Image: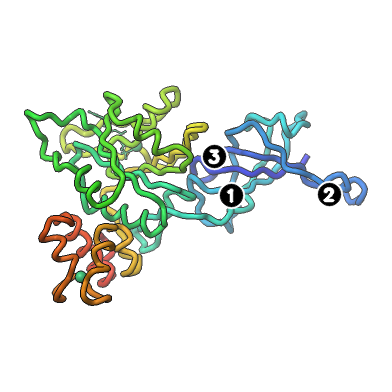
């Protein structure tokens, strides 16, 4: 029997994608040409199948690169001997599945590739979880670039400061820059966490509920460790941080979607060393800086660039420490990058 499935991509493995199927319907058999035989399919309906049934399907060549979070339509057949659509609960009951359609994405997280294009990392997100850690030391430019991406895609941003167990009053690490305070003052949500001690997980889990969230950030900050702590039974590859460089090894190589049941959906993504938002428009940059956007309404000139203009409320805000110096300097730098079309962030 020919069938059509609706599914959500878990991961793209190159040749094929893994996906969670949600519904199945029977399709008319094109090889049978009698209208009567196909009549039964006219009112054919989508049947809900066992939630999170994992399927494997090969995308048609004409489709764009698929990524974790994509909603797709697949077509194929039921395997020999399988007749009941509603009983589908494992990939062996299906055969020759092809992805035939990509449902329009609500949002897409991309990163610039080496060829000057954009590569999708995850899609249909409602929240970007920007993870940094006590070690490797936080890259604040990277954090602010991700804030811009979230603002531009109109999805909420949550800053996670992980490995808080490494901080101590007696032995402050160089990374102890009070990231949470900086971003809270900027008007963003933050949580200090430790996957080792469980610190902050209650608040974190509450923030994940009813969201599709993507974990992004430098390599080695503990993104996959966070997933492991939430789903201890799953096999999630957690890499050992490289002792010599203090930087994480690139352990996660493709984005991967995990269902937390009623508690949300979480996408783990590969760590990045460098990012860029220079493909965005000038006006997009301020979306990542709500504290600057707020004060900018009080500048004397509506088109103030917060550079050398008189009566600039933003510059005043920086002097008054209402806006963090590092945030303002990153804002100016990212604007400069956009203006000059600089692509290496
Ligand atoms: N002390 C401490 N170590 C942690 C914590 N969370 C993760 N780690 C360690 O940090 C290292 C890197 O963790 P991963 O989860 O692989 O980091 P990642 O962000 O997924 O890295 P990529 O996949 O390369 O992007 C591992 O050795 C973890 O054991 C934490 O809360 N405290
Ligand atoms: Mg990882
Ligand atoms: Zn101004």
Left or right, 300 with respect to 216, comes to: left
Is residue 249 at all visible to an observer of this figure? no
Q: How far is disc 3 from disc 1 in space, using C-alphas?
A: 11 Å
Dot 1, crowdedness within 10 Å: few (<14), some or many (≥20)? Answer: many
Residue 120: image location, x then y, percent: 43, 53
Q: Is residue 304 above or below residue 223?
A: below
Q: Quadrant of ligand 2?
A: top left
Left/right placement of residue 115 relative to residue 108 reads left
Question: Circle 1 sits in a helix, a strand or a loop, which is it?
Answer: strand
**44 with respect to 196 (left or right):** right
Q: Quadrant of residue 334?
A: bottom left
Alpha carbon of mark 3 to alpha carbon of mark 2: how far?
Answer: 30 Å
Crowdedness of circle 3 by 10 Å Cα count: few (<14), some, many (20+)? many
Residue 59 - label: 1
User: Which of the pair 301/16 is nearer the observer?
Assistant: 301
Q: Residue furthest left?
A: 170
Question: Which of the numbered marks, if any, corresponds to residue 18?
Answer: 3
Neighbour class for label 2 at 10 Å: few (<14), some, many (≥20)? few
**Which quadrant is the C terminus positioned in?**
bottom left
Disc sitting over residue 42 in the figure: 2
Q: Nearer the viewer, residue 303 or 330?
A: 303
Identified at 31% across, 53% down, the residue is 147
């Amino acid at each position: 029997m020919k069938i059509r499935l609706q599914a959500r991509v878990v991961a793209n493995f190159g040749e094929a994608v893994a996906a969670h199927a949600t519904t199945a319907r029977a399709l008319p058999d094109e090889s049978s040409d009698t209208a009567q035989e196909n009549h039964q399919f006219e009112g054919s309906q989508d049947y809900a199948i066992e939630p999170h049934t994992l399927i494997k399907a090969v995308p048609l060549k004409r489709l764009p690169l698929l990524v974790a979070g994509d909603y797709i339509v697949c077509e194929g057949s039921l395997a020999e001997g399988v007749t009941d659509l509603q009983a589908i609960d494992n990939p062996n009951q299906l055969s020759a599945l092809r992805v035939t359609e990509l449902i329009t994405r609500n949002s897409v997280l991309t990163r610039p590739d080496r060829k000057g294009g954009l590569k999708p990392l995850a899609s249909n997100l409602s929240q970007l979880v920007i993870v940094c850690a006590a070690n490797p030391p936080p890259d604040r430019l990277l954090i602010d670039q991700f804030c811009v991406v979230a603002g531009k895609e109109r999805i909420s941003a949550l800053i996670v400061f992980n490995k808080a167990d490494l901080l101590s009053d007696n032995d402050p690490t160089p990374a102890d820059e009070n990231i949470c305070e900086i971003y809270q003052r900027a008007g963003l949500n933050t949580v200090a966490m430790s996957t080792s001690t469980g610190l902050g997980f209650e608040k974190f889990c509450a923030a994940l509920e009813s969201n599709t969230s993507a974990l992004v950030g430098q390599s080695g900050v503990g993104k996959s460790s966070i997933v492991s702590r939430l789903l201890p039974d799953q096999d999630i590859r957690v890499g050992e941080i490289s002792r010599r460089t203090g930087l994480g090894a690139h352990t996660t190589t493709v984005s991967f979607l995990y269902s937390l049941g009623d508690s949300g959906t979480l996408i783990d993504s590969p760590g990045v060393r460098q990012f860029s938002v220079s493909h965005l428009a000038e006006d997009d940059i301020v979306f990542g800086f709500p504290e600057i956007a707020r004060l900018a309404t009080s500048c004397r000139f509506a088109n103030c660039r917060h550079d050398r203009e008189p009566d600039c409320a933003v510059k005043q805000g920086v002097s008054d420490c209402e806006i963090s110096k590092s945030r303002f300097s990153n804002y100016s730098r990212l604007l400069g990058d956009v203006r000059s079309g600089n692509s290496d962030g």
